[in-house]
Image: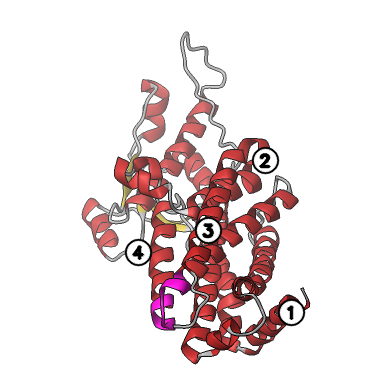
Amino acid sequence: MKQFIAFVRKEFYHVLRDRRTLLILFGMPIAQILIFGFALTNEVKDSEILLVDYAKDNASQQLISKIGASRYFKFSQAALTHDEILSTFQKGKIKAVVVFPVHFNQELLHNNKAQIQIIADATDINTANMITSYLSAIVLDYQTRLNENLEIPYQIIPETRMLYNPQLKGAHGFVPGVMALVLMLVSVMMTAISIVREKETGTMEILLVSPFKPVLVIFAKAFPYLLLSLVNVSAILFLSVFALELPVKGSIVLLFAESTLFIITCLALGIFISIKTDSQQIAMLISLMGMLLPTMMFSGFLFPIENMPLPLQFISNIVPSKWFYIIVKSIMIKGLGLSALWKETLILLGMTLFLLTISLKSFKIRLQ
């Protein structure tokens, strides 16, 4: 045990003295959580729109006030012609235009209906859809208030509730995904590189002929990254709670326990890569390309898995980050416990045992 602790201490010294390793370990998670949390959001905020009010009556002014009170838009008003509106779109100055026709209020009062034209720049499909949805919701809300005192024989009023994320904040989707991505990359890559480095420098042969058991050498190399990755988890949670205003609704103990299991899965994968490769460049390439793309594509973080073809849905099941993403999202946002997450936990546990078994069986304890 003393040998193991001494070896772990030596690994800690090695990591803490290397500034590039520290930058990858702690700089990357903080940068990613801030970039995904603040910059790469799919929310509509302060979108530039143009209001063309040909009516200038009571109803149009009330609707303009409601749009202006929203935090989603920055608007300007101008009485432009159709060609001038197209020219403004071509210059890229606005994302959408709302046109109020002449006699808008009169049409509404006398015919009980009036039209508003919403034109959106569909070169960015997602933003165009979001903006038109928000504007339609504002118009619908105004219409509902107008009909409050009217007795209509039949009417269906849908009541919409957005569970767990009523404000539709992007951080609710990004934080669990970034946590899975960061832990996967850091744990796999750093473990793989540190063990392959011993091979390249020839020190692995010295360790193998020492009284220290070869298997414990591997575990001692991975142990510091387990602790440092848990520090990363703490930093990500701290930023998500205090910077992105995303609290942890479930058990924080369970979240750390599940994170520890996922980190061990990643470390086992890193050990397997290190055993199968002989150079740091190849280990880094496999870790980056082999882990980054599957995590981005098959974890459900960026693309819905249920929309993928069946073969790709099957492949997604062997990506550990998919199960961890589900676990983190369920604990942090839904507040679920282990009774709801036992299946995902068992899958991660099975993956960990499988990877550790094949890694240790592949590890050559004799010199070549």
Say which residue label 1 marks: 3
Magenta span: 273-283
* Residue 39 visible in rendering: no
Q: Within the magenta stretch, is there residue 37?
A: no
What amino acid is at disc 2? Leu
What amino acid is at disc 4? Lys
Quarter of image, res 4:
bottom right
Q: Please tell me how many numbered marks the rendered image carries.
A: 4
What amino acid is at disc 3? Thr
Q: Indicate which label's residue lies in the foreground, 2 or 1.
A: 1
In this rendering, the answer to whether 230 lies above or below 345 is below
Checking the image for residue 338, the label placed there is: 2
Whichever of labels 2 and 1 marks the residue nearer the N terminus, that label is 1
Q: Indicate which label's residue lies in the foreground, 4 or 3.
A: 3
Question: Judging from the image, what secondary structure is the residue with disc 2 in?
Answer: helix
Q: Indicate which label's residue lies in the foreground, 2 or 4.
A: 2
Whichever of labels 2 and 4 marks the residue nearer the N terminus, that label is 4
For the residue carrying disc 1, how many other residues have a C-alpha within 10 Å: few (<14), some (14-19), or many (20+)? Answer: some
Pointers 4 and 3 in contact (C-beta within 8 Å): no
Q: Quarter holding the C terminus?
A: bottom left
Say which residue label 4 marks: 93
